Amino acid sequence: MPRTRLLPVAGFVLAFVGLVLLVLEVVRTLNGSALGALGAVLLWVGVGFIVVAIGLLTYTLLTASPDAAATDAADADASLQP
């Protein structure tokens, strides 16, 4: 699998993990739990993951060529035919 095909997957995974960390720490803070040093680190790691994920997904969208998409579609059609 080419490395460019892994970028969207990595972007979605980072976005999901970042969102989970962000929501977890915000909920803990809103429920009255003090945001300690570890909580602050997890909060900012979550934000960082989301920023990196958006960057990866944007890079993937901007560098995707229409020819590659047409080739992938043709390969998928060819693999479905007996």
Image (cartoon, grey):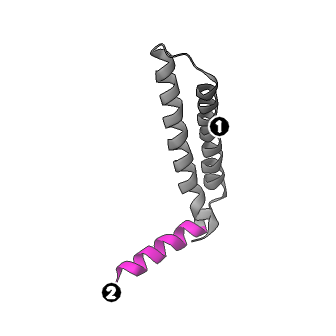
Residue denoted by label 2: 82
**Contact? badges 1 and 2 (CB < 8 Å):** no
- Considering only vertical position in the picture, is 82 above or below 55? below
Q: Disc 2 on helix, strand or loop? A: loop
Q: Residue furthest bottom?
A: 82
Residue at image point 60% right, 57% down: 7
Q: Amino acid at mark 2?
A: Pro
Q: Main SS type for the magenta part?
A: helix
Which image quadrant: the N terminus?
Answer: bottom right
Tell which circle, 1 or 2, labels the residue nearer the N-terminal end: 1
Q: Which residue is more in the foreground, 18 or 11? A: 18
Residue 65 falls in image quadrant: bottom right
Residue denoted by label 1: 48
Q: Is residue 75 magenta?
A: yes
Q: Which residue is more in the foreground, 22 or 34? A: 34
**Is residue 69 left or right of 51 when viewed as pictured?**
left
Magenta segment, which residues? 67-82
Q: Residues within 10 Å of mark 2 (few under 14, many from 20)?
A: few
Residue at image point 62% right, 63% down: 4
Q: Position of residue 82 (x, y in %)?
A: 33, 86
- Considering only vertical position in the picture, is 6 above or below 62? below
Q: Is residue 10 magenta?
A: no
Q: Residues within 10 Å of mark 1 (few under 14, many from 20)?
A: some
Q: How many marks?
A: 2
Q: Amino acid at mark 1?
A: Gly
Residue at image point 60% right, 21% down: 36
Q: Position of residue 22 (x, y in %)?
A: 53, 31
Residue 63 falls in image quadrant: bottom right
Q: Disc 1 on helix, strand or loop? A: helix
Q: Which residue is more in the foreground, 22 or 33? A: 33
